[in-house]
Image (tube, helix red, strand yellow):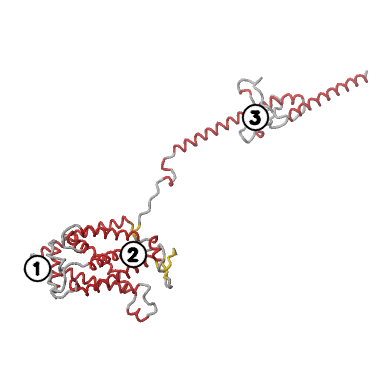
Amino acid sequence: MAAGAAASASGDTAEKDSAAEKAGADTEAAADEPAKPAGRTGLPKTRTGLPKSTGPDTGKPGDKPAGRTGLPKTGGPATKPAEKPAAKSPAAGAGAKPAAAGSTAAAATASAGTAAKSTAGSTAAKSTASAKPASDKPASAAPAKRDPIMIGSKSLGQWIGLGSLGLGGLIVAAGILILAARGVTTLPGVPGFLERYPGEYHLPDFVEPGFPAWARWTHFLNFFFMVLIIRTGLQVRHQQKPPAFYTPKNGGKKISINLWLHTSLDVLWLLNGVVFVVLLFVSGHWARIVPTSWEVFPNALSAMLQYMTLEWPMEDAWVNYNSLQQLMYFIVVFIAAPLAAITGVRMSEWWPKNATTLNKIYPAPLARAIHFPTMIFFVFFIAVHVFLVFTTGLRQNLGYMFAGTNVLGWAGVIWFLVAVAVVVGAWFAARPLVLAPIANLFGRVSSR
């Protein structure tokens, strides 16, 4: 009996061990397989019965749920159970599936909460971005401010302002002078002075009337060269960085291409002046611009007073200039032009640098102090000369000098317009792109 009981007990024990091993094997196999999301079969229709934690179920209803140490760090769905069952018992194996289902459901709930928070945060961010004022736009979206056009040290707007201010001041000053001059003509003795000295005196008999072709051509070339000389002189005076440089073929100092053009025009202008003066004395026309009587001074004063009252003096430039014109032309040809030439040579590269004694007698600062005011005189003379040509008889005066006739017509006006077009074209053509091929004939042009 005892042996039978022992055998029976041993058999029961063996069966239990076999069943336990089988259950453990099933549990391990279930743990090794990927966890499948629990189906909705058997789950309550509401989430009130789900556990609040994702820890493994201990199988004891009275125990508190495990902490959140097993929650995944991301909001995505869990692909594996957080932990394996602690015990290899049938009860633990039976409770593994409900625990996995609870873990999956909890992970889904956490993922949904995270997604909801993310969506809410994104919506709030969009709402905040849309609520920003339009002024917070980047500065690059605003239109770029254009730089002002600079002419020398001042902008175009500043020059226009200064020009307008100067023109206004000139008009006011002219009005005052006109009123003052007309007041002077009413003073005792002045009307008799104007009658005695009408503004001109008779020329010698050898002077022929009219303007020969050489006088008209040298007049045009003088106009052409003077405009470009003034332009290039201002460029040299105010240039910051020359657009190109010129070096002579036979060696010498490198200079800016603007200075090369300025000195080249000076040479051509002087050659034109020499031709004019030579032909002036050969033809006998010198007496038209060289005073031959002391009466030139009172007649010049009379002519100036008549100009100031806007009652132009009686004149016939085809035959004779008035005394004020004669004096001004004499100053231009025989004083201002030589001064411009002598001071220009002193400041140029042609002046000997090693002539110590000569440099002390005639220093460069003195030449510079004379040269610029001389240019201002030429600008003033040209402005007044053109104004008087236009206001004292446009067609007649232009006919004399540009058409060579004293017959009133439009030929002189047409030729004048052609001359102006040539000068304007040369003004805009005087650029390095055009000048470089010409300068390369006499030297070498480089960009630095």
- Which residue is disc 1 drawn over? 194
Tell me residue 229's x, y (percent): 31, 66
User: Who's the residue at 37% across and 80% down the image?
Assistant: 355
Closer mark to the observer between disc 3 and disc 1: 1
Q: Report the amino acid beneath label 1.
A: Leu
Q: Position of residue 90 (x, y in %)?
A: 76, 24
Quadrant the N terminus occupies: top right
Q: Residue at x 40, y 69 (%)?
A: 442
Amino acid type assigned to the residue bearing label 3 in the image: Ser
For mark 1, give the secondary structure: helix
| Left or right: where 6 falls relative to 73 | right
Answer yes or no: is residue 29 visible: yes
Compared across the picture, whether 24 is left or right of 403 comes to right
Picture quadrant where residue 212 is located: bottom left
CA–CA distance between discs 3 and 1? 124 Å
**Quadrant assignment, res 42:** top right
Give whichever of 211, 69 is nearer the camera.
Answer: 211
Circle on res. 232: 2
Q: Which residue is mark 3?
A: 53
Seen from the viewer's position, the closer of residues 197 and 215 is 215
Q: Amino acid at mark 2?
A: Thr
Label 3 – label 2 distance at C-alpha = 92 Å
